[in-house]
Image: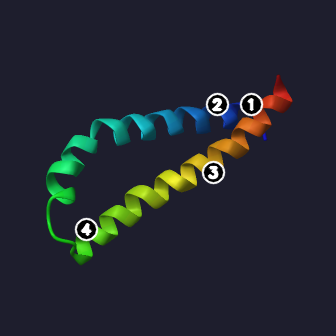
Amino acid sequence: MSRQIVLIASRTAVLYLWEWVITTGEEATHFWNGKLTGASVLFFLNRYLSMGYLLMNFLGIAQCLIRYV
Protein backbone atom coordinates (compact mmCIF):
# COMPACT_ATOMS: atom_id res chain seq x y z
CA MET A 1 0.00 0.00 0.00
CA SER A 2 1.52 3.33 -1.00
CA ARG A 3 2.14 6.09 1.49
CA GLN A 4 -0.33 8.41 -0.30
CA ILE A 5 -3.16 5.89 0.06
CA VAL A 6 -2.39 5.49 3.74
CA LEU A 7 -2.44 9.26 4.25
CA ILE A 8 -5.71 9.68 2.36
CA ALA A 9 -7.34 6.85 4.31
CA SER A 10 -6.11 8.31 7.61
CA ARG A 11 -7.47 11.76 6.77
CA THR A 12 -10.79 10.27 5.72
CA ALA A 13 -11.00 8.38 9.01
CA VAL A 14 -10.35 11.58 10.97
CA LEU A 15 -13.10 13.42 9.07
CA TYR A 16 -15.54 10.59 9.65
CA LEU A 17 -14.71 10.47 13.36
CA TRP A 18 -15.11 14.25 13.64
CA GLU A 19 -18.54 14.10 11.98
CA TRP A 20 -19.48 11.24 14.28
CA VAL A 21 -18.48 13.20 17.38
CA ILE A 22 -20.23 16.45 16.44
CA THR A 23 -23.52 14.75 15.50
CA THR A 24 -23.82 12.54 18.59
CA GLY A 25 -25.93 15.19 20.35
CA GLU A 26 -28.43 15.28 17.50
CA GLU A 27 -28.47 11.50 17.44
CA ALA A 28 -29.30 11.42 21.14
CA THR A 29 -32.08 13.97 20.68
CA HIS A 30 -33.75 12.32 17.70
CA PHE A 31 -33.12 8.60 18.06
CA TRP A 32 -32.23 7.53 21.59
CA ASN A 33 -35.41 8.81 23.22
CA GLY A 34 -37.91 7.65 20.60
CA LYS A 35 -39.42 4.27 19.96
CA LEU A 36 -37.54 1.75 17.86
CA THR A 37 -38.74 1.88 14.25
CA GLY A 38 -37.42 0.45 11.02
CA ALA A 39 -35.85 3.80 10.16
CA SER A 40 -34.08 4.04 13.51
CA VAL A 41 -32.77 0.47 13.18
CA LEU A 42 -31.36 1.32 9.74
CA PHE A 43 -29.84 4.51 11.16
CA PHE A 44 -28.11 2.67 14.01
CA LEU A 45 -26.88 -0.13 11.73
CA ASN A 46 -25.49 2.40 9.27
CA ARG A 47 -23.86 4.52 11.95
CA TYR A 48 -22.30 1.82 14.10
CA LEU A 49 -21.45 -0.81 11.48
CA SER A 50 -19.69 1.93 9.52
CA MET A 51 -17.73 2.88 12.62
CA GLY A 52 -16.77 -0.74 13.23
CA TYR A 53 -15.64 -1.15 9.63
CA LEU A 54 -13.66 2.08 9.83
CA LEU A 55 -11.88 0.97 13.00
CA MET A 56 -11.02 -2.45 11.58
CA ASN A 57 -9.80 -0.87 8.37
CA PHE A 58 -7.79 1.73 10.28
CA LEU A 59 -6.08 -0.97 12.33
CA GLY A 60 -4.96 -2.57 9.08
CA ILE A 61 -3.67 0.79 7.85
CA ALA A 62 -1.84 1.32 11.13
CA GLN A 63 0.04 -1.92 10.52
CA CYS A 64 1.05 -0.62 7.09
CA LEU A 65 2.24 2.65 8.64
CA ILE A 66 4.51 0.72 10.98
CA ARG A 67 6.17 -0.88 7.94
CA TYR A 68 6.93 2.56 6.43
CA VAL A 69 8.45 4.01 9.59
Q: Earlier in the sequence, mark 3 or mark 1?
A: 1
Which is more foreground, mark 4 or mark 1? 4
Q: Earlier in the sequence, mark 4 or mark 1?
A: 1
**Gap in Å between the C-alphas at discs 4 and 3?**
24 Å
Asked if disc 1 and disc 2 are in contact, CB closer than 8 Å, the reply is: yes
Which is more foreground, mark 4 or mark 2? 4
Residue type, mark 2 in image: Leu
Asked if disc 2 and disc 3 are in contact, CB closer than 8 Å, the reply is: no
The circle on residue 7 is 2
Residue positioned 85% across, 31% down in the render: 67
Helix, strand, or loop for circle 4?
helix
- State left or right for residue 64 relative to residue 51: right
Residue type, mark 1 in image: Arg
**Gap in Å between the C-alphas at discs 4 and 2?**
33 Å
Query: Residue 10: horizontal and vertical position, in percent?
Result: 59, 34
The circle on residue 56 is 3
Residue type, mark 4 in image: Ser
**Gap in Å between the C-alphas at discs 2 and 3?**
16 Å
Query: Residue 52: horizontal and vertical position, in percent?
Result: 53, 54
The circle on residue 40 is 4
Q: Earlier in the sequence, mark 4 or mark 2?
A: 2
Residue positioned 71% across, 36% down in the render: 62
Classify 10 Å Cα crowding around label 3: few (below 14), some (14-19), many (20 and above): few
Residue positioned 25% across, 68% down in the render: 40
By what rule are the colours in the image chosen?
rainbow
